[in-house]
Image: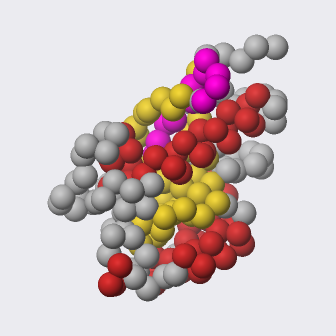
Amino acid sequence: MSLPNVVRGRCVVVGDSTAGKTALVQVFLSDGSDFPKNYNMTFTVELHQKQVRIPDTAESVELFIYDCSGKDIYRDVLQSVLNPNLAIIVYDVTNEKSFQAASEWHKFIRETKKDKTTLPGVLMGCKTDLTERRLISPKEGNDLANKLGFVYMECSAKDNQNIDDAFFYLANEWHKMYSNGVNATLNAA
């Protein structure tokens, strides 16, 4: 059985407000050329799309990226529209509250997943450029990621450092799952 040239996957980006979700997504979508200088709160969810080429193949993963609001008021709406295949939980390395909320976000996205298949994910520590204000160590982030069953990464959207890593990792994981036939409905977006 040959694979289609494009495999589609739904990637949710969640975390507390002001953790860096939208900046992460916008810098990724613009290939590093667009860092949002002003904070604009996301209302409910913003949907974006980008194809990620899978190395050593003729295939791509088309990521449908759901940039989700961090406000509690939107959780009911989000729960009714989300059914993620992939997830990025974002926290701000200078904000203890956003780090502590990561476990709750993990629980939330697990509850929104309609099937119980594997959910590849990344715990992303954002704003690493704020070195003097940093409160959460890489070890703490890595320990939490291991507890959640996710991979740990850090980035700075402002400095365009390690932005693509999470999306490329998830696209490759999704492609592997699809090619191994883990779920017959993986191609539905």
Residue located 30% across and 59% down the image: 159
Q: Magenta residues?
A: 55-66
As drawn, which residue projects farthest toward the front?
Answer: 56
Q: Nearer the viewer, residue 183 or 144?
A: 144
For residue 31, which quarter of the picture? top left
Q: Residue at x 60, y 46 (%)?
A: 169
Residue 122 located left or right of residue 43: right
128 falls in the magenta region = no
Please state if 40 lies on the left or on the right of 131 as rendered.
left
Q: Which residue is rendered at x = 45% and y = 55% of the image?
A: 162
Q: How is the image coloured?
A: secondary structure
Whether 62 is among the magenta residues is: yes
Q: Is residue 127 above or below residue 166?
A: below
**How many numbered marks appear?**
0
Work out which quarter of the rendered image holds the N terminus and state it: top right
Write the residue at 54% across / 62% down: 153
Q: Nearer the viewer, residue 168 or 14?
A: 168
Residue 172: image x %, image y %? 64, 38
* Residue 85 image offset from top left, x and y in percent: 64, 43
Q: Closest to the observer: 181 or 108?
A: 181
Residue positioned most to the left: 38
